[in-house]
Structures are given as C-alpha cells and as structure tokens.
Image: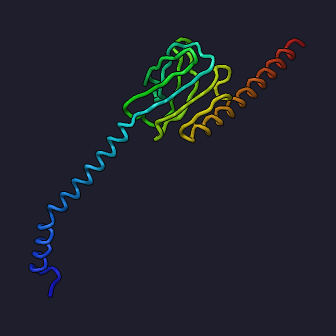
Amino acid sequence: VSIHSNETWCYFCDYHEKNLGMYKKILGAALLIAGFSANQAKAQGYEIKVSIKNSKDSICLLTKYTWEQPYKVDTAKVDKAGNMTFKGKTALEKGIYSIYSPKKGALYFDFIVNESQKLTITTDTVNFYDKMKIVGPKENTDFVEFVKFMGSKNMERMSYEKEVKAKKTADSTK
C-alpha cells in the first residue's frame, strides 16, 4: 500500500479543507494582534524631560545625529528654572540625540535613545557631564562615563601640546 495513494491524499485534502476556516481565523487573529502591538509601540511616543540648572535659554532643540549632519527632531520651551519637555506621539528612532541651544549656537550634550522612550535628564551649565543624572536607558550611564573619560584624555593631550610648544619656544630662543 502506497503512502501517497489517492485515498490518503483525499483524506488529507478533506481534513485541511474542512479546517481552512479555522486556519483563516487563527491567521487573522495573529495578524490583528501583531498589528495592534506595532501600533501600541508607535502610539506610546516619547517624552524627554530635561532640566539644565542656570540655563538662560528660552527654547532648546532636540536633534538626532545622521551620517550627513544632525537634524532637528523637536523644539521645547525652557522655563525660568531651566526645565523643558520634548514630547511626541510617534516613537523616536534609536540613536544618539543631543540638546542644542539655538541662542548660543552650541550643542549642550548628547544621550542615547533606545526602546525606552521616557528619559529624565538633569544637569548644570557649569559642567554638563560631571553633574549629569539620567533616568532612562542604562546605556546612558556608560555613555556619560565614556564622554568623561575622553574629556580627561583630551585635557591631557592639550596639556602635553602646551608643554611641547613651550619647549620649542624655549629651544628657539637659545
């Protein structure tokens, strides 16, 4: 007896034909749940609360780095205490973002946005990264430590360059 006999094949087809409606319902429900989940993620949006002590800005920009250049994502009013909130209905793309002061034409600081779209950042204009506290993605703690480390190495480099320049100047006067 062949496994692929017409009788076996017909039974297989009849079984699946009778249950096709059930398969369609299960597939439809799965697609509905997947679509709802995707919409929920987008519907959550983002909220980034920033407090910069001693800030004199009236507005600040939230910018995102791209390959070409940073681009403006959002704008927030800054109150007299230096508080601002960037808020949107659509989730942000993962990446490195920054707070930019159009008044000073200067970048204040960078931070990371990932799946977590809710952040609270507090700092001071005196030394942004040394006084910074971030509640949000844990990668920001490592990122801030990296920026501090690179800043200290840059200070060492500048000090070394100053020493070398002073020695060259002293040598040239002999």
Horizontal and vertical percent position of residue 25: 19, 57
User: What is the quadrant of the N terminus in the image?
Assistant: bottom left
Horizontal and vertical percent position of residue 59: 49, 15
**Rendering quarter of residue 154:** top right
Residue drawn at 59 percent across, 22 percent down: 52
Report the residue that reaches farthest toward the bottom: 1
User: What is the quadrant of the C terminus in the image?
Assistant: top right
Query: In the figure, is residue 18 to the left or right of 151?
Result: left
Horizontal and vertical percent position of residue 143: 60, 36
Residue drawn at 30 percent across, 45 percent down: 36
How was this image coloured?
A: rainbow
Q: Which of 45 and 164 lies nearest the eye of the viewer?
A: 45
Image mark count: 0
Residue drawn at 50 percent across, 18 percent down: 60
Horizontal and vertical percent position of residue 93: 42, 35
Query: In the figure, is residue 96 to the left or right of 38?
Result: right
Report the residue that reaches farthest toward the right: 174
**Rendering quarter of residue 148:** top right
Residue drawn at 12 percent across, 67 percent down: 18
Query: In the figure, is residue 163 to the left or right of 61?
Result: right
Q: Which of 71 and 174 lies nearest the eye of the viewer?
A: 71
